[in-house]
Image (cartoon, rainbow, N blue to C red):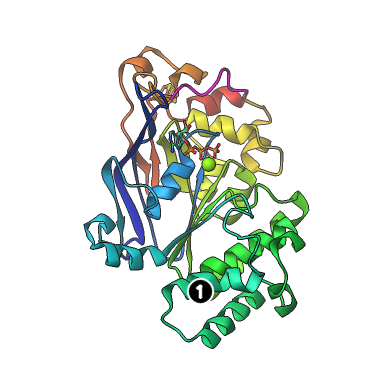
Amino acid sequence: MSTPIVSAQDLRIQFPTQDRTETVKAVDGVNFSIQPGETFGVIGESGSGKSTLGRAVVCLLKPTSGQVLHGDVDPYSLSSAALRRQRRDFQIIFQDPNAALNPRMSIVESVREPLDIIGDKPRAERQRLALEMLDLVGLNADFGRRYPHELSGGQKQRVNIARVLTLRPRLVVCDEVVAALDVSIRADVLNLFADLQRRFGLTYLFITHDIGVVAHVSSRIAVMYLGRFMEMGPSETITRRPLHPYSEALLSAEPVPLPSAMRTGKRIVLQGEIPSPTNPPSGCRFRTRCPVARDVCAADEPVWREIAPGHHIACHFPGALGGAAGH
Ligand SMILES: Nc1ncnc2c1ncn2[C@@H]1O[C@H](COP(=O)(O)OP(=O)(O)OP(=O)(O)O)[C@@H](O)[C@H]1O
Ligand code: SF4
Ligand SMILES: [Mg+2]
């Protein structure tokens, strides 16, 4: 295997609560690596720490402990100028198509802006590159003259993709990038991501709470709960034969055509809310909602282990719920 583009080792990110009396453990000991050219999906309920993880990968957030490596480099060991350069290779696109667009800038100006800031190419060249990138995302020069309010959400998200790709990044974190879009155009935008990946040899970290989306685009999937990964493996394995009770529950809630939902035919409704990340449950942090929890789950934290080649899990009783749901 080649050197990963990104890896995380026991990554932890904490925030003080608003009254500063407690600590939010948003990411609480995560390990993974992403290979060049792959799409790594992260799924989990709201508040599980997905966006925090994505922001750490692109150095928008500094780890509280553990580390994120870019290749074999710790970006925080670099000088500030070298870190700025490094960040160009690791970009992020957010859910809100308006987030990165200045309403007073024309579309082509917005796409050109990252190149303007770097300023190492003549203006005419920057303009040419911006128009070329707009064309690649399916927007002709006419769109370049327009302003954000004249575009649909899907078109604006295409502009955001073009803007990020002018920098020719190596990895792009896609944080719920189709969640705000009309269902009818989501597939088009996802297909565009796939086309651009082939063309530019991009690597994606694809964050979503929509299993349908992540199954569609990812080669591997990690299932995140309360700051930790519960299960991680090939997309096919996680969607067809998940072994962690949390993965099973998430997948069972998905309408067909996901195969695992068809297999069990039963929807597993998780009881209760996701506990507070300031004070996660002892032992297995999923135990307060796990339908198959036993005493040992409260006493001992399950170890993150490789249960089959490339398939990792943290559970004392992998597959226990699969049996229960199947009958
Ligand atoms: N800057 C911050 N300050 C304090 N707490 C934060 C901050 N950012 C995130 N959190 C908390 O960290 C936890 C994880 O948040 P995060 O946004 O990473 O979750 P998420 O999985 O992306 O959720 P969603 O699906 O709703 O986007 C939440 O409890 C959140 O309130
Ligand atoms: S360790 Fe126990 S509580 Fe946690 S997911 Fe597995 S069976 Fe459920
Ligand atoms: Mg988020």
- Residue 274 colored in magenta in the image: yes
Residue that numbered label 1 is attached to? 200
Label 1: which secondary element: helix
Q: Position of residue 186 (x, y in %)?
A: 70, 55
Residue 321 vs 240, above or below: the answer is above
Which residue is at 58% across, 33% downward? 250
Which residue is at 75% across, 50% downward? 182
Instruction: Decide which of 92, 303 is in the foreground and name it.
Output: 92
- Residue 141 colored in magenta in the image: no
- Dominant SS type (magenta): loop
Magenta segment: 269-276
User: Within the image, what quadrant is residue 150 found in?
Assistant: bottom right
Q: Position of residue 268 (x, y in %)?
A: 62, 25
**Is residue 167 visible to us here?**
no
| Quadrant of image for the N terminus | bottom left
| Quadrant of image for the C terminus | top right
